Amino acid sequence: MRNADFPFLPKDFIQTKEGLIFAVVSYSPHDEKVGCFLRYIPNGNDWVKVDTAEANKLLQQSSPQYLYQSKQFDTTFHAVPVTDIVEHHRPEQRLNSVLGREPDDEIEQKLHKLLPILMHYGVNSESLGLTGSMLINQQRSTSDIDLVVYGRKAFQQTREAIRQAILEQKINELDLSLMNDNYHRRAGELDFDEFAWHEHRKFNKAAIEGTKFDIGMVCLVNELEQDHSQYKKQGKRTIKARLIDDHRAFDFPAYYRVDDQDTPEVVSYTHTYVGQAKEGETIEVSGSVECDITSGRCRLIVGSTREAEGEYIKVCR
């Protein structure tokens, strides 16, 4: 599953010699660095989660070596040299570790109950991993369970398992309180009703005994479609177009092919708009235009910043 030369995948965490913990967001290296985003900083013997503004400010002030100016994407993001990594937290190893012993807390107890339910509906536990706060044992009683699914086929099987388990009341759809919490965490551009309508059809989130869990897909090596283009930002654009190919809608980043002549590809770097629409639907997209400096081919980016202010994808109903 992992490339021996570059064993880092999205949803992994990496820890630096300063004790900073970054979430990996890139499949391939950037000048021998791992593309990532700062998520946790040391706080005594534990870590505290930081938001985007805090993360950027902290790196600018104390660790500017982890700010990377990408020529390929015409932007700055976080990246850590492989030589600075002192610990590599892998979701599949963490899941095996937690499942291989008695639960330590209420969230781990719920994970121990959830996995047999998913396996009953055909999910192979070997395709799963555990990320988020549980990957580094920083979960609290209010934490979510964040599962990784490796491979598109396994991911779609897991979505179907969630759908069937909800139908047979083994797990629950997100209730109003959990959906509201999900909405405010995402801080997106859609109103609550629009957000909830899109979320309810994805079957990538549900609840077990009042705790939300979600699944995020990581591609296998043979599923990756490498892009070596060099992009230049061209300003903002809003379009309405028909979705003509959704087979990468749940990838990270998510890809959508649309019938718009100027920007035929929509790419979402924010999890809010992963799996947002289905083939044949008409969508409205607001984002940042990027053009390949060699071919002139343009695409529309949603999530040019982590918060994706002013950027969205929604189905025209």
Image: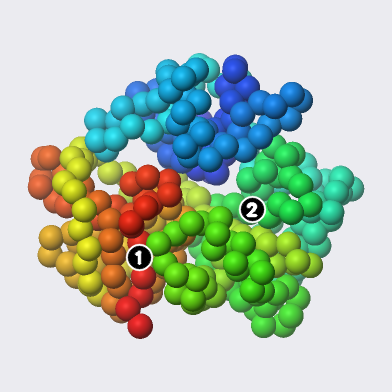
Position of the C terminus by quadrant: bottom left
Tag 2: amino acid: Asp
Residue underneath mark 1: 313
Instruction: Kindly tell me whether residue 217 is visible in this rendering.
Output: yes
Asked if 237 appears above or below 290 in the picture, the reply is: below
Q: Residue at x 29, y 30 (%)?
A: 70
Disc 2: which residue: 146
Residue 53, position as x, y percentages in the image: 47, 37
Q: Which residue lies furthest to the right in this view?
A: 102
The reply to whether callout 1 and callout 2 are in contact (CB within 8 Å) is no
**SS at mark 1 in the image:** strand
Q: First in sequence: mark 1 or mark 2?
A: 2
Q: Residue at x 60, y 68 (%)?
A: 179
Q: From the viewer's perspective, is 113 left or right of 122?
A: right
Q: What element carries label 2?
A: strand
In the rendered image, which quarter is residue 92 located in? Answer: top right
Q: Say which amino acid is labelled 1.
A: Ile
Residue 35 position, x and y percent, is 43, 33
